[in-house]
Image (tube, rainbow, N blue to C red):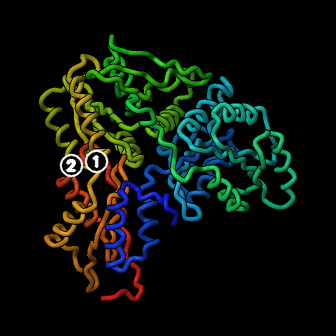
Amino acid sequence: MNDQHDHGALGDAEYAEFMELAAEEGFDVEEVEGAIEEAGHGPLPVLAVVGRPNVGKSTLVNRIIGRREAVVEDRPGVTRDRVTYEAEWAGRRFKVVDTGGWEQDVLGIDASVAAQAEYAIEAADACLFVVDATVGATDTDEAVVKLLRRAGKPVVLAANKVDGPSGEADAATLWSLGLGEPFPVSSLHGRGTGDLLDEVLKALPEAPEQRFGNAVGGPRRIALIGRPNVGKSSLLNKVAGEERVVVNELAGTTRDPVDELIELGGKTWKFVDTAGIRKKVHLQEGADYYASLRTAAAVEKAEVAVILIDTSDHISVQDQRIITMAVESGRAIVIAYNKWDELDEERRYYLEREIETEMQQVSWAPRVNVSAKTGRHMDKLVPAIETALAGWETRVPTGRLNAFLGELVAAHPHPIRGGKQPRILFGTQAGTKPPRFVLFASGFLEAGYRRFIERRLREEFGFEGTPIHISVRVREKRGKKK
């Protein structure tokens, strides 16, 4: 290990003390270092899979993630609930954004393929460009190449549908795209995908570029998300009011203005706009897909997700999916219940019951009851965002954490299973934004016990408004001294 080794969130003295503790408990030093490093890396790097329709992108995504999860259907324009998946190759984890095979409508390349590709590229650390080797480079492919060049992200070129040696020559013609070596693959049969993924890992950073907080004192980034027609645009307009500092008209052939710098509560915030699907896209069937792709791109760029819920309607499955997306992305979270002032007593009563049952997974998130129309309680939005950010950045010193874990295990030991009682030996917080903990244990910890630990961590240390990631490493049996 070199001297510049990354200790995650631990200082040198704390790190040395922690490693001594690990050695005493019989843990392998390299294993412990690896666990801290892995947990400390934070958000996973993002790979966008782009290309024109019907080149086999979703089949390739399924191949990469190792399960049939992305929708694969010959009919273009299939609506998807999710566009982001987690994958692992050669011991490294990363996220895959599937831009699907979405049909070009009469408005052509600018209105459809480019729109979805641009949203995905924006959120990505690297791109996998899929071309059908049996067809060769088309005008649409050339247009996507221009988008990729403009974005300046690393690109890996996949020449798909090369099912045998005879197709290698077709793949070689794709050198003409000017993106470097085309990697011949068959997403259907898996041929060549190992070499392709090796190349993908070279293109992806070990840890993703932090898309926020780079400038000292720069504006914090907020994504305003929610299902279509929930009032995102109205809320954005209301918070902007007359106090808008500047609107960044990020010129591009395929998108509306994206970011708004807004003065709120005496501070400038950058609102990453997810409001409104592009007006030119008339194909309603694809609207939900564009919305989810755009939401995923905005959440990847943000620090805080403000999730807007329409209280005049029941909390829907779509609301739940958007919440899950924000939680899985590890962003700080605020829940804003819109149209609160329009509720009668009966609806308010039933809504509170719904919130208790349907919003359990984010019961830790600050809540504001607002009206985008009248501006009611807009002043409560900033304190809620600040609370969530504070929770997101909270760091618990290792000594204090282990004192807490010791008391917890003594008072509430893990249930005995199969004659054995797994025990948490020690732990550390490997990172923040969101808080990430690694617990080292003598045996497997059940999901229910992990949830109990998370609940108690929140009671003890706050963590309001932030997801918490807990990973558990079990001590390998290696003739440890007792």
Q: Is residue 278 or residue 242 the one in the foreground?
A: 242
Viewport quadrant of the C terminus: bottom left
Tally of marks: 2
In the figure, residue 241 lies in which quadrant?
Answer: top left
Q: In this view, does 431 lie above or below 421?
A: above
Residue that numbered label 1 is attached to: 394
- Whether residue 317 is visible here, answered yes or no, is no
Q: Tell me residue 186's x, y (percent).
A: 73, 57
Amino acid type, label 2: Gly
Q: In this view, does 243 lie above or below 405?
A: above
Horizontal side, residue 220 vs residue 160: left or right:
left
Q: Tell me residue 259's x, y (percent).
A: 46, 24
Residue that numbered label 2 is attached to: 462
Horizontal side, residue 245 vs residue 203: left or right:
left
Q: Residue at x 19, y 58 (%)?
A: 456
Q: Is residue 324 or residue 460 the one in the foreground?
A: 460
Q: What element carries label 2?
A: loop
